[in-house]
Amino acid sequence: MNLDKTATPPGHPEPDRDRCDERPEARPDHRPEGRDEGRPDEHGEDAPQGPGSALRAAIRRRFARTNSWWTFLVLMVLVTAFSIMRPEEFPTTFNLRNVATDAAVLLIVGVGMTFVIIMAGIDLSVGSVLVFSGVAAAKTMTAVAGADAGWGAILLGVLAGLAAGAAWGAFNGFLIAKARVPALIVTLGSLGMALGLAQVMTEGQDVRGVPTRFTDTIGNGRFLGIPWLVVIALVVTALGALTLATTRFGRRTYAVGSNAEAARRAGIGVDRHMIKVYALSGTLAGLAGVLSLARFTTTTIGGHANDSLGAIAAVVLGGTSLFGGVGTVVGTLIGVFIPAILQNGFVILGVQPFWQSVAVGAVLIAAVYADQLRRRGRQRR
């Protein structure tokens, strides 16, 4: 009698043959580890059911894995200390409005930098891209209509600034993703190229004659008592936070930063995504250049030498890991205000502003050290 050894004995359930291949990459529902809200989290606990609860849980986990709470505590200590020492000057509406306005441009740059660093990249060129974009916007506005330009010419200038920033970002991303040139080298080269071309376009002189309607409204105007610069920066921050926490683009950014090879095997176009992230960083640097132009009514070519390092410091202070895969835009929002509060407080106290660099540097080193300790603890578990 010919017996089929693969047959199932009577009364026994049919085996699930689809699970014979236990390789993760063979499963159609495979995702990068820790990036699917429907899977157990890193502590082995089941994710809450429902899209709303899953989103809140994901945001809480990502925020808790950063240094954001610690950075927020430092920020509150600084605000409290300066308020106690100068109660008539520091905690006033006028002064806090100035602090927020000073931080607005750097915050927009920091949002783009957050995506780059979460992806385990770096962008040293954003300060120069900011300058180049401001020059492109100013040249366009003045060439079309001059100081009396209407909103049509202003819009063309804004679009020129955004396009210039996006082009530099895409250029960086292409060389990093396709040519395999290290991000540090590419963006360091772009830093010099963008600034040099901006100086060539202006012959080393700041562009003036920016439309007064643009500077009066966006640069110095207010919406419900809040400066337009601050309003725009907060809108960009909110959109960046939502994109990072709730969209496929954000999940892919975390996945690529955590493990680029695993993301590639999971079907993510890593190279294409890297180009998009760097283009986003360049676009936001371009927007920052346009807003800086509106605030100062000129291109301020020599005033943004430290913006790249300032943005990186703000992102790291906000808890984003330089090793990639961890970070939040909300943390960057907190990190941006630490140097802004320090600078403002030192001016009010009459302390030499050079001490600001010392204080920010010390806090930055402490933040990176805390991140390393946290990573070592996770590896031991």
Image (tube, rainbow, N blue to C red):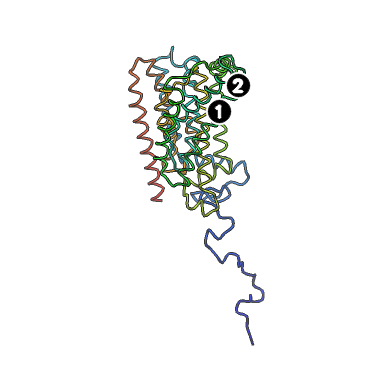
**Mark 2: amino acid:** Ala
Residue labelled with disc 2:
153
Q: Is residue 1 above or below residue 236?
A: below
Q: Residue at x 47, y 49 (%)?
A: 260
Residue labelled with disc 1:
160
Q: Residue at x 57, y 47 (%)?
A: 37
Whether residue 72 is visible, yes or no, is no
Distance of label 1 from label 2 (alpha carbons): 11 Å
Residue 318 in the image, given as x and y percentages of width and height: 44, 33
**Mark 1: amino acid:** Ala
Secondary structure state at the residue bearing disc 1 = helix
Give the left or right position of residue 303, taking residue 134 as reference: left
Q: Residues within 10 Å of mark 2 (few under 14, many from 20)?
A: many
Whether residue 253 is visible, yes or no, is yes
Labelled pair 1, 2 in contact (Cβ < 8 Å): no
Secondary structure state at the residue bearing disc 2 = helix
Residue 336 in the image, given as x and y percentages of width and height: 45, 28
Q: Residue at x 52, y 19 (%)?
A: 294
Nearer to me, 241 or 89:
241
Q: Residue furthest top?
A: 88
Which label sits on residue 16? none
Q: Quadrant of the N terminus?
A: bottom right
Q: Residue furthest bottom?
A: 1
Residue 81 in the image, given as x and y percentages of width and height: 39, 21
Nearer to me, 365 or 256:
256
Count of numbered badges drawn on the protein: 2
Q: Decide which of tag 1 and tag 2 comes sooner along the chain.
A: 2
Q: Is residue 184 above or below residue 102?
A: below
